[in-house]
Amino acid sequence: MKIIDFGLATYLTKNKMKEHIGTPYYVCPEIIDKSGYNEKCDIWSFGICVAWALTGEYPFQGEDFDELIDSILHKEPKLNGNISSEALDLISKLL
């Protein structure tokens, strides 16, 4: 995976971050519910990338921003496509 666009990058301090930023499809629940987050939210985003790469779809969907956020917070990921049980396990652990 190639990582690009460090426009939002920052140094992580010992405190959890609380600012709500990022592309909605890749945002982890901790950012949405403002409970505070750290570098582990990048693992979630990577899980979204893996799911998208293997299925061609985002695992959390919505007709609009509010539905997408509700899906991330309250629904199980939808993983359509013919992917292996090992891939499903990996995605599950990343998310």
Image: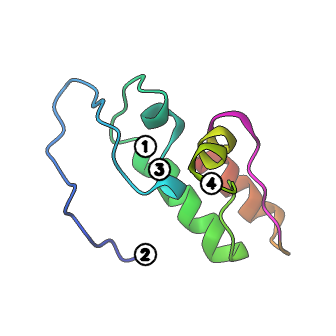
Q: Which mark is residue 33?
A: none
4 or 2: tag closer to the N-terminus? 2
Query: Circle 1 is placed at which residue position?
Result: 41
Residue 24 relative to residue 88: left or right: left
- Marks 2/3 in contact by CB < 8 Å: the verdict is no
Residue type at mark 3 is Ile
Say if the magenta span includes residue 78: yes
- Marks 4/2 in contact by CB < 8 Å: the verdict is no
Q: Which mark is residue 1?
A: 2
- Marks 3/1 in contact by CB < 8 Å: the verdict is yes
Query: Circle 4 is placed at which residue position?
Result: 64
The quadrant of the rendering that contains the N terminus is bottom left
Q: SS of the residue at dot 4?
A: loop
Residue type at mark 1 is Cys
Residue type at mark 4 is Asp
Quarter assignment of residue 59: bottom right
Say if the magenta span includes residue 74: yes
Question: Which residue is found at the position 33% from the left and 46% from the top?
Answer: 21
Question: Which residue is found at the position 33% from the left and 35% from the top?
Answer: 38
Query: Circle 3 is placed at which residue position?
Result: 43
Q: Residues within 10 Å of mark 4 (few under 14, many from 20)?
A: few
Question: Which residue is found at the position 50% from the left and 55% from the top?
Answer: 26
Viewer-proximal residue, 22 or 3?
22
Most common secondary structure along the magenta stretch:
loop
Q: SS of the residue at dot 3?
A: helix
What segment is highlighted magenta in the picture? 73-80
Viewer-proximal residue, 25 or 93?
25
4 or 3: tag closer to the N-terminus? 3
Q: SS of the residue at dot 1?
A: helix
